[in-house]
Every structure is written in C-alpha cells, then in structure tokens.
Amino acid sequence: MPSPTPNTPPPSQTTPETTYSTILSKIDAAHAEDPTKTTLPSGEQIPYELLYAQKSTAFLTQRFPPASPALRLAVRAQHFRRWEVPRSTYPAGRAGYLTWRAYLKTRQADLVTALCREHDLPEEVTERVGKLMRKEGLKNDEETQVLEDVACLVFLEDQFAEFERAHDEEKIVGILRKTWGKMTARGREMAMGIPMEGRAREVLRKALAG
C-alpha cells in the first residue's frame, strides 16, 4: 500500500455546530464595532449593540428554549450594523421612521444571509434566517412571533425608561399599547416580570388598563 503523501491536508473538521459558532462570532465582532458605548453596573463600558444582542439572546433562552439555529442567529443579529444607517439619514416624522425601519430590516437580513453563505451554512437555514430577520409571516409563524417578543422585551427592559423620560404620557401610552399588541401571551407574561419603578410602571398600568 502506498504511503500517504506527506503534505496531504487533514480532513475538514467543520461541523454544523462549528459553522454556527463561527457565524455567531462574526455577528458579535460586528456588534463590537458599534461606536456608541453603554456603561454596565460594574462600570465597564461595552458597545451598545453588543449588549443589545446579549440581552436578546438571554430573553430568547427564557422565552423559547428549543429555538432553532436559524432563530438564534436571527435574534442575535437583529440590529446588525444598524449604527451605520442612523435615524437622522431619513426625514423626520412617522413616514420617515417607517421607511428607515423597512430599509434596515431588509439591509440587515441581506448582510447576515451573505455572512451565512460565506461560511457555508446550509441554504435552507440561511434563507430561514433572512425570513426571520425580515419578520415574514409574523401573524402565523411561531418563531417570527418569538423574535418579535424578544425585541419588545428588550425595549421594555433596556430602552423604555429613557423613552418614558423623553416623551409625554399620551405618546408613551400609545407606544406601549402598540408594543403590547405585537406580543404573544407568553411574551406579555414575561414583560410583566420586568422590574420598573415610579412613573414607568404607572404609565404601563395605564396603557394596559385602556
């Protein structure tokens, strides 16, 4: 039997799990480039979008433990390179806001699916990641509903207090009712467990009472 060629490379050790981990690392590396920093209770500063992604994954783990790899990637990448297209690049007002959000949703999905293909994630999983990030089938797709729950939960925990301080009560109540209307029963149950103090809790109570 001929001896093996000395320079023959070893067989590839790539597995679906290592592919997933590699893509996840690339997503986090992009989040880490966010120039906006936030300060943790420990005093450590961290890029805001990296913290957002970590909180999203934490809520996903609680909300839907059997999440598929596609859903885990889509949740982790929800704000992929969002800071590159600031809100100020679109006109003020609701129409401008909705146009900005629609563009971001498509752009982020395109960037992440390109990353998935670059690392040879199976095409059916890659396409699923894109559909989830675009929130297709929100009314009848369980995983898309879970992704929406996670986004709402992070907003309530991480962004609502600042939002509440910056706007009048009428606007806040309207936003909360819209947020609540997007969530599933399980998502709402989790939302009620988020610690809130003072006026924020009172405004939430008023929104739900209406």
Image (cartoon, helix red, strand yellow):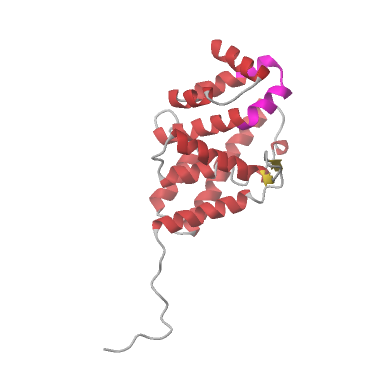
| Identity of the residue drawn at 63% across and 36% down | 100
Q: Quick check: 78 left or right of 167?
A: left
Residue 136 appearing in the image: no
Where does the image place residue 116, in percent across and percent down from the top left?
Answer: 48, 54
Q: Residue furthest top?
A: 210
Magenta stretch contains residue 169:
yes
Q: Does the magenta stretch include residue 55?
A: no
> Which residue, as the protein is rendered here, is positioned at the far front?
42
Give the left or right position of residue 168, taking residue 135 as reference: right
Q: How would you classify the magenta stretch by its main secondary structure?
A: helix
Q: In which quarter of the image is residue 146?
A: top left
Tell me the quarter of the image containing the C terminus.
top right
- Across and down, in percent, residue 124 comes to 39, 49
**Magenta highlight range:** 158-174
Task: Give the percent coordinates (x, y) of residue 120.
Answer: 44, 59
* Quarter the N terminus occupies: bottom left
The correct choice, above or below, for 34 with respect to 160 in the image is: below
Residue 73 x %, y %? 48, 46
